[in-house]
Amino acid sequence: INSFNKTNVNMIYIANWKMYGNLADIKSLKNVINLSNQKKFKKSKIIYCPPFTLLDVFIKKTKNSKIIIGAQNCHFTNSYGAFTGSINSKMIKNIGAKYVILGHSECRQAGDTNTTINKKIISALSEKLNIIFCIGETLDEKKKGNTKKILKKQISIGLSKVKKNKNILIAYEPRWAIGTGITPRLQDLEKTILEIKKICKKMPNVYSNLKILYGGSVNNENSSQIVKIPFIQGLLIGKASLNSKKFIDIIKKTII
Ligand code: PGA
């Protein structure tokens, strides 16, 4: 554990724009593109996940940069069908996005279960999309001491039938930390990350190439402490990513 060497880590920064953003907001990408082209950024990754309506313009705008684009959700089937209001993984792939966020706490709250999330993951993997798989306990589950149990369930069901992990990032996002300004105590976070690692170790297909990120109220003040925690290889950033200055500030303070 202690031999984990952060200097070898390529940091991953994910901007989750949720249900924010219009065409005018694309302007703010310019500074982030400039940053991503800098030499010291060579090994790291920036992934933008704008709403579906902006995927195409984001992809075009970032074409000659190192920024990668992802979607925020997909339907559980990858075939076309009569599902009004839904987007499948084939469509996401077709537009040129490379990632998709699945299992986000806000989608779980809106009805996604571990089983539907698993179907979505299998569907997205079959289209060779990369997955940002979100897990995390609620405040109530945490208070009852059930964090480990919940994470284990989310991981084992969510990632069942995954044959080979070439492209899954696990983002630990405690629900009580999302959008609240509250983050876990560093020692608690370190413990939970190790638990996630341990859970995944029992799933060799997942464990190989395992990458764990943290998300939930990341800002330019707490980020540099968070990335010091062993095995955290990136950040999933909601609110602070909407403001390119703040997003850049987080990246600059944490790039390794
Ligand atoms: P937040 O959101 O940074 O606004 O807490 C993170 C997320 O929901 O992915």
Image (cartoon, rainbow, N blue to C red):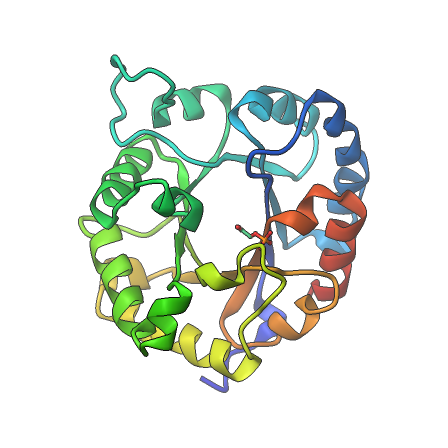
Residue located at (50% from left, 29% from top): 97
Examine the rendering and report whether any part of residue 182 can be seen. Answer: yes
Q: Which quarter of the rendering shows the C terminus?
A: bottom right
Residue 32 position within the rendered picture, expressed as x and y whole percent measured from the top left: 76, 42
The quadrant holding residue 23 is top right
* Nearer-the-camera pick, 132 or 2: 132
Position of 15 relative to 21 (above/below):
below
Residue located at (43% from left, 25% from top): 92
Residue 146 position within the rendered picture, expressed as x and y whole percent measured from the top left: 29, 74
Residue located at (78% from left, 56% from top): 249
Position of 148 relative to 128 (above/below):
below
Position of 223 relative to 241 (above/below):
below
* Nearer-the-camera pick, 187 or 169: 187
Examine the rendering and report whether any part of residue 196 can be seen. Answer: no
The quadrant holding residue 80 is top left
User: Is residue 219 toward the left or the right of residue 117 in the image?
Assistant: right
Q: Which quarter of the rendering shows the N terminus?
A: bottom left
User: Is residue 151 toward the left or the right of residue 96 in the image?
Assistant: left
User: Is residue 27 toward the left or the right of residue 194 in the image?
Assistant: right
The quadrant holding residue 217 is bottom right
